[in-house]
Image (cartoon, grey):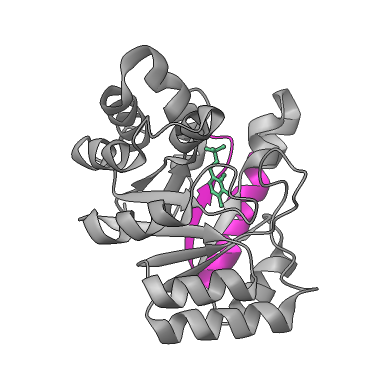
Amino acid sequence: MTQRQLGVNIDHVATLRQARGTDYPNVIDAAKMAQAAGADLITVHLREDRRHIQDRDVVALAEVLEIRLNLEMAVSDEMIDLACRLVPSDVCLVPEKRAELTTEGGLDVVTGFEQIREATAKLHQAGCRVSLFIDPSAEQIEAANAAGAKVIELHTGDYANAQGHQRQAALDRLCQASQVAQAFGLQVNSGHGLTLANVQPVAAIEGMRELNIGHAIVSRAVFVGLAEAVKEMRQAIESA
Ligand code: PXP
């Protein structure tokens, strides 16, 4: 079985800082703590409205991290230029709507094909590994492969929000999507809405490689501390 990796998303450490315009809690210290506690990569979403992570955070993280930095960003010229300058090891292209609370739904690679294909090529040329954040649909996976991506991240929001039979159905869709993607030779990651209570069935999907988890880890850190919250999530993933 392939080793599952944990990407710790620290956006909401920055949310807390931005809520008061202070210089604490320190996002870089949080990243270092997550790294020491066993995170395989640090994930941040530089949103166009800069509601949590700021440009200076991404610059500093790219300099200090010993593990991989996964930059989630919209497919815009501004973000692509920034990523080509900073060259984080990983870029995850995500859809973005200004008024949304969080990333709602995956990237529509079918509709935005040409723009996403060009962005993927530019980012590959700069030296970033490119992942496309998509819903678990065969049509989107096929388009992601045609656009040149080597990695997809399956949006697990529907699974996380569903109950009972619907949750099982959503899990089945993730399993099928993972198989379709692997048949194309794509690496399969997942993320969104994953918690200690719901992560294991996703981590157990055949071929699942990386799980990017933020809100649940930072929330849990309020009670047990960030290092412990990261360790707990790692353990849950490893024992899935
Ligand atoms: N993966 C992607 C592509 C995301 O956009 C997000 C949210 O920023 C996450 C993972 C993490 O989601 P959550 O904070 O719900 O764990």
Residue 139 image offset from top left, x and y in percent = 74, 69
Residue 126 image offset from top left, x and y in percent = 41, 83
Can residue 204 be seen here? The reply is no
Q: Nearer the viewer, residue 212 or 63?
A: 63
**Total count of labels:** 0
Residue 147 image offset from top left, x and y in percent = 62, 81
Q: Nearer the viewer, residue 174 or 114?
A: 114
- 104 lies left or right of 122: right
The quarter of the picture showing ligand 1:
top right
Q: Quadrant of the C terminus?
A: top left
Stretch in magenta: 171-194
Q: Nearer the viewer, residue 82 or 45?
A: 82
Q: Quadrant of residue 137?
A: bottom right
- 161 lies left or right of 199: right
User: From this viewpoint, which residue is outermost toward the top?
Assistant: 223
Q: Quadrant of residue 34?
A: top left
Can residue 55 be seen here? The reply is yes
Q: Quadrant of residue 203?
A: top left
108 is within the stretch colored magenta: no
185 is within the stretch colored magenta: yes
Residue sitting at 74 percent across and 50 percent down?
A: 98
Residue 32 image offset from top left, x and y in percent = 24, 42
Residue sitting at 48 percent across and 71 percent down?
A: 82
Residue 55, relative to residue 85: is it above or below? Answer: above
- 26 lies left or right of 158: left
Residue 27, relative to residue 109: is it above or below? Answer: above
Residue sitting at 33 percent across and 35 percent down?
A: 26
